[in-house]
Image (cartoon, rainbow, N blue to C red):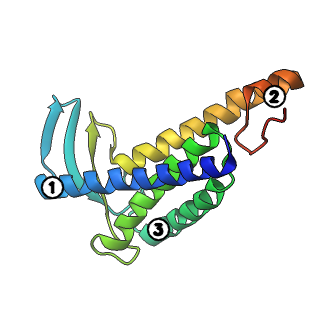
């Protein structure tokens, strides 16, 4: 895959993630009452609209600006890395993490009370687990893919003889296979 194509795919995935996240939040805010359970699969999975000023599990509710700054840095880093992407192992984590961070950052900037203090719209609720949104899910899946690659796949590739590693393609850190 060409570097230009990989970069375009990473940025496109970021934008698609933001669009799906913001559209889902808009639909939920327009159609659900806050703090009311809407069972989808009984009490195991339900929609439950809350506004979260903190991070995961509503931790750090007084540190909203700090989370906003971290999200700005994450989006900037993912945009930078998007232009260094060379394979699916870099495109997917960059696009999902960057898009998820950008989706929640939009809430921090534009939702009440705004100005980097905004509350993030969360609405997926599984049992007694945390309540989260599409952006949170994208970040989690992106981090899981990155860890899967760095812990299991990259070490296996590095231990292969050179001719086998070349056949398998490109790695996350941009090392492109030479023919």
Lower position in the chain sequence, tag 3 or tag 2: 3
Label 2 crowd (10 A; few <14 / some 14-19 / many >=20): some
**Which label was assigned to residue 20?**
none
Instruction: Give the label, 1 or 2, closer to the camera.
Output: 2
- Note whether residue 106 is visible: yes
Q: Residues within 10 Å of mark 3 (few under 14, many from 20)?
A: many
Of 112 and 153, the residue lying toward us: 153
Task: Say which quadrant the N terminus sits in.
Answer: top right
Instruction: Compare residues 69 and 79 and report the one nearer the observer.
Output: 79
Mark 1 or mark 3: which comes first in sequence?
1
Counting the numbered discs, the total is: 3
On the rendered structure, is 150 left or right of 26?
right
Q: Quadrant of the C terminus?
A: top right
For the residue pair 63 and 16, the one nearer the viewer reads as: 16
Residue 169 position within the rendered picture, expressed as x and y whole percent measured from the top left: 73, 31
Q: Report the disc number at residue 166.
A: 2
- Residue 60 seen in this snapshot: no
Q: Which residue is mark 3?
A: 68
Q: Residue at x 20, y 42 (%)?
A: 47
Residue that extends furthest to the right in the rendered view of this protein: 162
Mark 1: secondary structure: loop
Q: Which sits earlier in the primary sequence, circle 1 or circle 2?
A: 1
Q: Residue at x 12, y 48 (%)?
A: 36
Residue situated in front as seen by the camera: 83 or 138: 83
Q: Which mark is residue 34?
A: 1
């Amino acid at each position: 895959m060409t570097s230009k194509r990989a970069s375009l795919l990473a940025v496109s995935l970021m934008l698609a993630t933001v669009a799906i996240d913001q559209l889902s939040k808009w639909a939920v805010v327009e159609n659900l009452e806050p703090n009311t359970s809407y069972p989808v699969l009984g009490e195991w999975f339900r929609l439950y609209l809350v506004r979260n000023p903190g991070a995961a599990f509503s931790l750090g509710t007084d540190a909203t600006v700090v989370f906003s700054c971290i999200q700005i840095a994450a989006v900037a880093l993912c945009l930078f890395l998007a232009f260094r992407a060379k394979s699916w192992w870099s495109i997917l984590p960059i696009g999902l993490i960057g898009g998820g961070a950008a989706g929640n950052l939009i809430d921090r900037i534009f939702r009440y009370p705004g100005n980097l203090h905004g509350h993030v719209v969360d609405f997926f609720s599984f049992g007694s687990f945390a309540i989260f949104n599409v952006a949170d899910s994208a970040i989690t899946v992106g981090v899981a893919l990155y860890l899967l690659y760095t812990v299991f796949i990259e070490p296996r590739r590095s231990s292969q003889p050179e001719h086998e590693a070349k056949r398998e393609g490109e790695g996350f850190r941009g090392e492109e296979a030479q023919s």
